[in-house]
Image: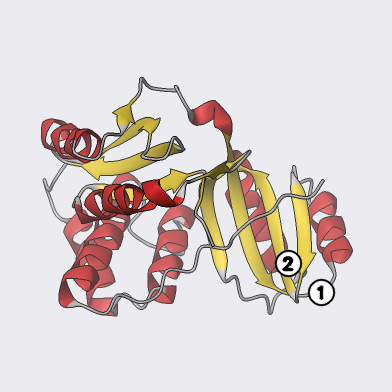
Amino acid sequence: MGRAFEVRKNSMAKTAGQKSKLYSKFGKQIYVAAKNGIPDPVANPALKSIIDRAKREQVPSHVIEKAIDKATGAGGESFSTSRYEGIAPGGCYVIVDCLTDNNNRTITDVRNCFTKTGAKMGQPNSVMHFFDHLAVLSFKGDSGDVVLEALMNADVDVSDVESENGQITVFAPATEFFKAKQALQEAFPKIELEVEEITFIPQTRKDIAADDVPMFEKFMNMLNDCDDVQDIYHNAQLPS
C-alpha cells in the first residue's frame, strides 16, 4: 500500500513560554479524559494514553497529578472540542483542533490567525475529506510482516504497516486505536511505543512556493500561540 509518513517529533520547548503552552495542552487533555471517565489510568485507557504521551514530552509529574486531582473535585471547568478548517497561506489545506471552555474566545482567536495572514477559513468538513483519520503507532523493529500477522490475529482492522530504517509504523482506522495498541502490547510485551496518536494524515501534499513560506510560518506560529489550539494538521510541503 505504501504511505509516506513523517513521524512528528517536536523538540522539547526551550523557553518558559513554550513549556507553559505544552504543559497547558496536556493538562487540559488529562483533565478532560479524567473528568469524562474514571480518574485512574489503569482503568481508563484514554487517560493512560494521554499520560504516556505527556511523559514522552517530558511533562512533569506534578502537572499530570494536578490535572487528575482537579478532575476528581466537585464542579470544575467544562471543556469542549472545536475544529476549524480552511486554506492556509500557499494554498494548502489545514485542520485546527481546539479544546476550550469559551467557544466565542476560541473562534475569535483562530479567525484572527486566518484573516491576518490572508488564509481562508472554510465551513465544517470542507477539507477533512483530503485527509485520512488514522491511529498511528510507531516503534523500533524490522519485521513488519510479523507485526501485521499479530494484529490480524487479534482481529484489528489494519490500514497499513510500514517498516523502514529499523522503525515500524502501524496505521489503522481511528476507531481501532486502543484495540491495536493492546494487541501490540500483548503480542510484544517489551514494546516501547515512540508514537501513539490519532491524527489526520494528508492524502496528497501541496508544494508551497518559497515566496509563501514566510506567511505560512507566521500563520502556524500564530495558531501555536493560541492557548486553546491543541493540534494543527496540514498538507504543506515546504521547499527544501
| Dot 1: element | loop
Disc ID at residue 168: 2
Give me the residue at 24% from left, 40% from top: 117
| Dot 2: element | strand
**Depth check, front residue: 202 or 82:** 202
Judge from the rendering whether residue 13 lies leftward or rightward of residue 180; answer left or right.
left
**Depth check, front residue: 166 or 122:** 122
x, y percent for residue 81: 30, 37
What amino acid is found at the position of numbered circle 2 in the picture?
Ile
**Depth check, front residue: 182 or 142:** 142
For disc 1, the marked residue is 142
x, y percent for residue 84: 33, 32
From the viewer's perspective, is residue 176 above or below residue 42? above
- Compute the Cα span from label 2 to label 1: 7 Å
Disc 1 crowd, CA 10 A, few/some/many (<14, 14-19, 20+): some
Residue 32 seen in this snapshot: no
From the viewer's perspective, is residue 103 above or below residue 69? above
What amino acid is found at the position of numbered circle 1 in the picture?
Asp
